[in-house]
Amino acid sequence: MGKCVNHPDRDTDFICMKHNVHMCDECVSCRDPEIYCKFRSSCPIWFMHKEKKREARQREAQAAIKTLMSCGIHFRSFFAAHRYSRLSQREVGA
């Protein structure tokens, strides 16, 4: 068990094997998500990082749905109109 790199008063079990730093539950996030890491396939920090990103995307999608619903837009009619406009643009451009 080590101390969090950002919060020295907190003990933690999470360690980044690539950078050899400990992180608490609040700080847990991949430091280099775009760069190769040989530990990634078995890294709990990477797994938690992906889960946080997925949850954030779901919250954004739910907020967008609520916004559309509050505007009185029905999804099927919205997507049907969007699809129709795309098809019409193809015909005009062709």
Image (cartoon, rainbow, N blue to C red):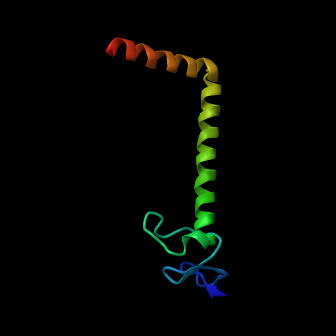
Which quadrant of the figure has residue 67?
Answer: top right
Nearest the viewer among 58 and 72 is 58
Which quadrant of the figure has residue 78?
Answer: top right
| Residue at (44% x, 20% y) in the render | 86
| Residue at (63% x, 84% y) in the render | 9
| Residue at (42% x, 67% y) in the render | 35
Q: Position of residue 55 (x, y in %)?
A: 64, 52
| Residue at (61% x, 85% y) in the render | 3
Residue 55 visible, this angle: yes
Q: Quadrant of the N terminus?
A: bottom right
Residue 74 visible, this angle: no
Q: Quadrant of the C terminus?
A: top left
Q: Position of residue 21 (x, y in %)?
A: 53, 82
Quick check: 54 above or below 67? below
Quick check: 25 above or below 4? above
Quick check: 49 above or below 56? below
Q: Position of residue 80 (x, y in %)?
A: 57, 18
The residue at the far left in this view is 93
Give left or right: position of 33 versus 22: left
